[in-house]
Image (tube, coloured by chain):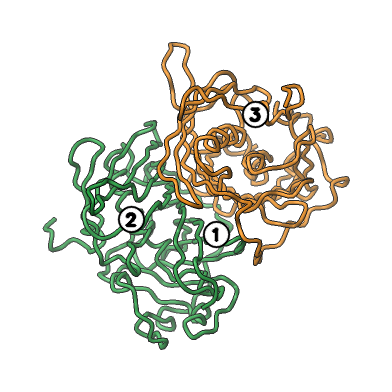
Chain colours: A green, B orange
Amino acid sequence: MHAATLSEFDRDTAVRRREPGVYDADLSAGWAIGHALNGGYLLGVLGRALADALPHPDPFSISAHYLTATVAGPAVIRTDTARTGRSLSTGSASLFQTDADGTEVERVRVLATYGALDALPDDVRTSAKPPQIPPYEHCFGTEHDPSGADTPAIAARLDMRLDPATVGWALGKPSGRGEVRAWFGLADGRAPDPLALLLAVDSLPPTAFDLGLGGWVPTVELTVHVRAFPAPGPLRVALSTRNLAGGFLEEDAEVWDSADRLVAQSRQLARPLRDGS
Amino acid sequence: MHAATLSEFDRDTAVRRREPGVYDADLSAGWAIGHALNGGYLLGVLGRALADALPHPDPFSISAHYLTATVAGPAVIRTDTARTGRSLSTGSASLFQTDADGTEVERVRVLATYGALDALPDDVRTSAKPPQIPPYEHCFGTEHDPSGADTPAIAARLDMRLDPATVGWALGKPSGRGEVRAWFGLADGRAPDPLALLLAVDSLPPTAFDLGLGGWVPTVELTVHVRAFPAPGPLRVALSTRNLAGGFLEEDAEVWDSADRLVAQSRQLARPLRDGS
């Protein structure tokens, strides 16, 4: 495929294999929130490297620990295979960047098990139900935000519309329920796939905002289960937090595809750095 | 402390540092379910090694990928530190055993971030509520199991009583809701602590039984968040599954202590190997 026709997400999560287990990447400032690159975007980059390093194509369970903020620019990813089996493989991956003084610093460490989603039987006994979100036309995009707040660079990469019931925080009226729901897609129309699900679970405004906490909410750890290849069309993402305590919170995400399938579930441990709005 | 006074759990999760980053352990058959050692017990062993290797004492977020079944007997744990910070540290750990032909095989790989629970502020804004379980005296222990099924070795290590509403499967009448709830403690009365929480989230009968699935339900991956040091006294553990599909299921666990604090949350990806009972 000619480079000019690549989706932004594919172009910006591309990795080049330098040698077995070593990949180069050019991380794009287009996926930043403030000064730091979005954790889900980084998970997409690392996930792409692991998909090449392991004999199975799709992340089934992938955990990332974010050590220090990753910035735009060059990065090196090193992978290590723990085990390759008939239906599942497991490996680790680390993303490094070189500091101004020439030191290589590890930014993100990942541990993941991969499989082949298209090899799974198609029985579905999911008891969970899709989130109730008003139609897309009745939801709010960043262009509708009356608060006048600066939009992060990543917003231009996404086609995201928030459930009006979960935007009170943008008007100084957080609901206190710790919920955020949205329609989600990529701005250039690229169809969702497993790697895009890794982005989707970490791209909505944080539940911390709906709990009345402002400021930065860095992710300590994020674990995603990808359970099915998403159908084409818009995704629905629902976030919830039930355990804000001791200076940390858990943020759960569910991603539902256009066929009402629960295609991904995640939980992250995050650390709101400033109380109050 | 004299060895004879150690709790079973402390004795059987003990590790001996051979050199920095290398630990020896003797894994006990007392924590087996069938032929394989319980995943939560193994996480306790690996968690103890990481607590020694890292400068912070408590697992805040710990993920384990189970590669092949671990058996009783000698094991070696190798740790690697990714980053040490002021309040958090991150590292990896792998558990190896030597096969009959002398090959060292990796059984479990772990990635975790540690901190100090006693350094956390004591604000609690948890919106989740403790599970509704009848009093301990009205719940069922394995000695009450009328089905006559063999009890696994680990049952003798635990003081566990199941909510009557979640034992129908033992009588051939699974509820289909995918829920299991129980009072949980260690049989020798040892008070709970963070490492014991790693055991607690993986010690109840699996939700798969309540969904009408019999047989073995191996854990592919397990991620635990430890959010507070548990108060002394019995724990309440509640499991739930909402996404049984494609031959896999997620099993969520919440652990509540005697002070009604949500001290741990976990999710595992598991793979029921045989449908039907």
From the image, tell me which residue sits under label 1: A250
Q: Amino acid at mark 3?
A: Ile
Residue B22 percent across, percent down from the top left: 47, 26
Q: Which mark is residue A207?
A: none
Q: Nearer the viewer, residue A65 or A19?
A: A65
Q: Residues within 10 Å of mark 3 (few under 14, many from 20)?
A: some
Task: State the residue position of label 3.
Answer: B33
Residue appearing at x 59%, y 48% in the figure:
B251
From what the image shows, is residue A235 above or below residue B43? Answer: below
Q: Residue furthest top?
A: B101
Q: Secondary structure at mark 1?
A: strand
Of badges 3 and 1, nearer the viewer stands: 1
- Dot 2: within a 10 Å radius of its alpha carbon, few (fewer than 14), some, or many (20 or more) residues? many
Q: Residue at x 65, y 26 (%)?
A: B12
Q: Give the image location of residue A177, x and y in percent.
A: 60, 73
Q: Is residue A244 left or right of residue B98?
A: right
* Amino acid on which disc 1 is placed: Glu
Q: Chain of mark 1?
A: A
Name the residue at the right extreme.
B137
Q: Which mark is residue A42?
A: 2
